[in-house]
């Protein structure tokens, strides 16, 4: 299991154990993490699960796909170099810890 840390804009943190194959978005929604809206349910169609991957965690996930880049361009908060859709971040058994920062607003 991966320990995923969700850092809120105010600095507070939620740490959740995430099973392999589960996305960062699914874990957030299942555990009522504030700031992950997930309107499209994980289809990479809405950008309401936008997160900023902590620089120390970026090497743990595959590069961003074109569809993700396109959706993040329409996100409510600014795009950063580490912007990703949390519905596209699938945890694996090889990842011990993963950190994402939640934007101040999603919609």
Image (spheres, rainbow, N blue to C red):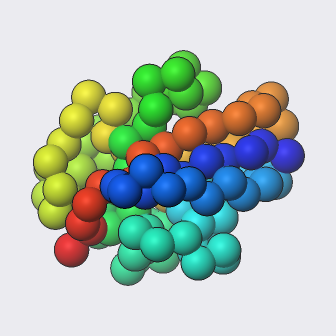
Q: Nearer the viewer, residue 27 or 41?
A: 27
Which quadrant holds residue 97? top right
Can residue 67 be seen here? no
Q: Is residue 52 left or right of residue 94?
A: left
Residue 104, given in percent of the width and then of the height, sits at 26, 60
Q: Is residue 98 left or right of residue 46?
A: right
- Asked if 45 appears above or below 92 in the picture, the reply is below
- Asked if 99 appears above or below 42 in the picture, the reply is above
Residue 95, given in percent of the width and then of the height, sits at 75, 32
Residue located at (32% from left, 68% from top)? 48
Tally of numbered discs: 0
Which quadrant holds residue 40? bottom left
Residue located at (59% from left, 78% from top)? 32
Q: Is residue 18 left or right of residue 45?
A: right
Which quadrant holds residue 107? bottom left
Residue 16, given in percent of the width and then of the height, sits at 72, 57
Q: Nearer the viewer, residue 71 or 98?
A: 98
Q: Is residue 41 left or right of residue 96?
A: left
Q: Nearer the viewer, residue 23 or 45?
A: 23
Residue located at (56% from left, 54% from top)? 13
Residue 18, given in percent of the width and then of the height, sits at 76, 54
Can residue 56 be seen here? yes
């Amino acid at each position: 299991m991966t320990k995923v840390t969700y850092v809120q804009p105010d600095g507070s943190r939620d740490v959740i154990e995430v099973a392999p194959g589960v996305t960062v978005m699914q874990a957030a929604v299942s555990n009522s993490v504030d700031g992950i809206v997930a309107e499209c349910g994980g289809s990479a169609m809405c950008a309401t699960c936008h997160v900023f991957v902590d620089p120390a965690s970026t090497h743990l996930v595959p590069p961003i796909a074109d569809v993700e880049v396109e959706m993040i361009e329409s996100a409510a908060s600014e795009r950063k170099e580490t912007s990703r859709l949390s519905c596209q971040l699938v945890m694996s058994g090889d990842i011990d810890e993963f950190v994402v920062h939640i934007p101040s607003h999603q919609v």
